[in-house]
Image (cartoon, coloured by chain):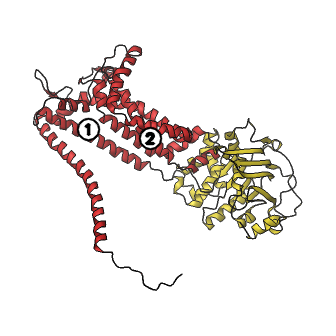
Chain colours: A yellow, B red
Amino acid sequence: MSNTTSDDSLITTEVQTESNDESAPPAGAGTAVAARDLNVYYGDEQAIDDVSMEIPEKRVTALIGPSGCGKSTFLRTINRMNDMIEICRVDGEVEFGGKNVYDDDVDPVALRRKIGMVFQKPNPFPKSIRDNVAYGLKIQGFDGDVDARVEESLKGAALWDEVKDQLDSSGLELSGGQQQRLCIARAIAPDPEVILMDEPTSALDPVAASKIEDLIDDLAEEYTVIIVTHNMQQAARISDRTAVFLTGGELVEYDDTAKIFEDPEEQRVEDYITGKFG
Amino acid sequence: MTDSTESPDLSRQGGLTRLKEGTYGGLFAACAVITLLTTVAIFVTLLSDAVVFFRATPIAEFLTGINWSPNPAGGGQAFGLVPLLIGTLVVTITAAFISIPVGTLTAIYLSEYATPNARSILKPLLEILAGVPTVVYGYFALVYITPALKATLFPEMSTFNALSASIMVGIMTIPMVSSISEDAMSAVPDELRQAGYGLGATKFEVSTGIVVPASISGIASSYILAVSRAIGETMIVVVAMGAQARMPAIREAAFGIPFINPADVLLESGMTITVAMVQITGGDLTGGTLPYNSMFALGLTLFVVTLVMNVISDIIAERYREEY
């Protein structure tokens, strides 16, 4: 599957490159998503507190932090899934493709077609495996070879070999881990630029979770992956960059993953990572 | 852990408690049995009197006869089901054309589009619609709908006609469709909607492409229920459709295929199975006469039809049940 990102349409701010860690983005890697002075409120409660961060393209960026720290809210701010929550209010900017996604002329439906999402609980539609993967193509009026794209996506989600003989059976007949990979196949089928993952392995057993982790690594070759996780080891294993949110929606530290886990600048981050709180 | 100085009392409870428990269980079971017995008793009564009727009138004659005249002044008594069946089918199908689309779209609106405020007002209102006595609907059809239709679309329509009655039966069964369908749609987990929105689906695409298919078994059940209700509806039809067992003209289309023009039925008065039964009970009939027994044959027919509908509904619900 070719990534159709047109680089000129993206903001090409350079990400931090001083780290000599292997997983650091190479100089010149573009920014896929950038938050600027972002504040999010649920009614009177502030869920995101003045967050600015640039998320590199074709890398895995992990958002970690204790429950209620705003990491999921931040994720859902990127593809405007928060629009559906009536009391949610967003201040500031989220830039994607050279545009503030909260501009009046941005259609959240069009935005979400460029930004796929994988949820905490595997949520395949009660449809066949094929129809699940093809759903995004169908609603986007894809006029190419749907079956080929379905196969490609299932291969991309490391599920093809397990389901190629049962494409017409219900997606709900799969195991939890397979369902989650089906959801990943469904998310990548329309060829988005960014994939948001909201604790994608927290409802899975360790074996299934580790398969997803391997898959995330592969996905980052073609997509920008932003993943919320409760599991710090997971963030350390799979991500290139890690953002630590602490209570109140404050982005405390954001750096290369190795730096965050080995030598964080902030004492609070070190306390959180070493399990002193959170 | 605290040390327990005495061992816990594990002995069986005294006789009174056990007696009470047993009594409660028996009471609940008795109530369940009453329902069962009533159903069986109704069926047996219907069947036994119907058998008496079918001894005098062969079943084939009853099912294919095109003349219903149980109590003629002159003579020529006839018990042909066909005109009543046509009346019942026309009312039921026409009503379904109103209740199913309106009810389904209402359900989608309530479940997917309405704000919580709008829903909290609209849902009870719809349920009130279901609580209006059907005789009121009947007069409404006769006094308002028929004159309105006469003044606008069908000047030649008769005062008692199947169309007004059907429209009213359709309106009466809307809440049945909308309420049960809405329950089914609301039961669809929000994760599925989120998945759809996450893929860039619009609200319409999520509602029609995800929520409706996921709740199709509940929706289908609501249709069957509404149709069964329409089949059994009596008061609206008595008041608005009149009580003339008319056999519509059978016309011939191309290739000699016979058909009945719906307008011949809809714009004229007619009689349904239920109305025929009302008419018989309305007369000063004594038990044991043939017209009296014919009532049970009609009742049995309705019973069988609704039973079949219920079975179909169960099969549909079973077959399309979505585990989510």
Q: Secondary structure at mark 2?
A: helix
> Which residue, given by chain and number where applicable, does mark 1 sit on?
B302
Does residue B158 appear to the left or right of B3 in the view shown?
A: left
Residue occupying the far bottom of the picture: B5
Counting labels gives: 2
> Which residue, given by chain and number where applicable, does mark 2 sit on?
B179
**Numbered disc 2: what chain?**
B
Q: Is residue B263 above or below residue B229?
A: above
Which residue is at a point 59% across and 59% down the rendered structure image? A178
> Mark 2: few, some, or many residues within 10 Å (few <14, many ≥20)?
many
**Numbered disc 1: what chain?**
B
Q: Nearer the viewer, mark 1 or mark 2?
A: 2
What is the CA distance from the residue labelled 1 to the residue labelled 2?
Answer: 25 Å
Give the image location of residue A160, x and y in percent: 61, 56
Q: Amino acid at mark 1?
A: Leu
Residue A2 in view in this figure: no
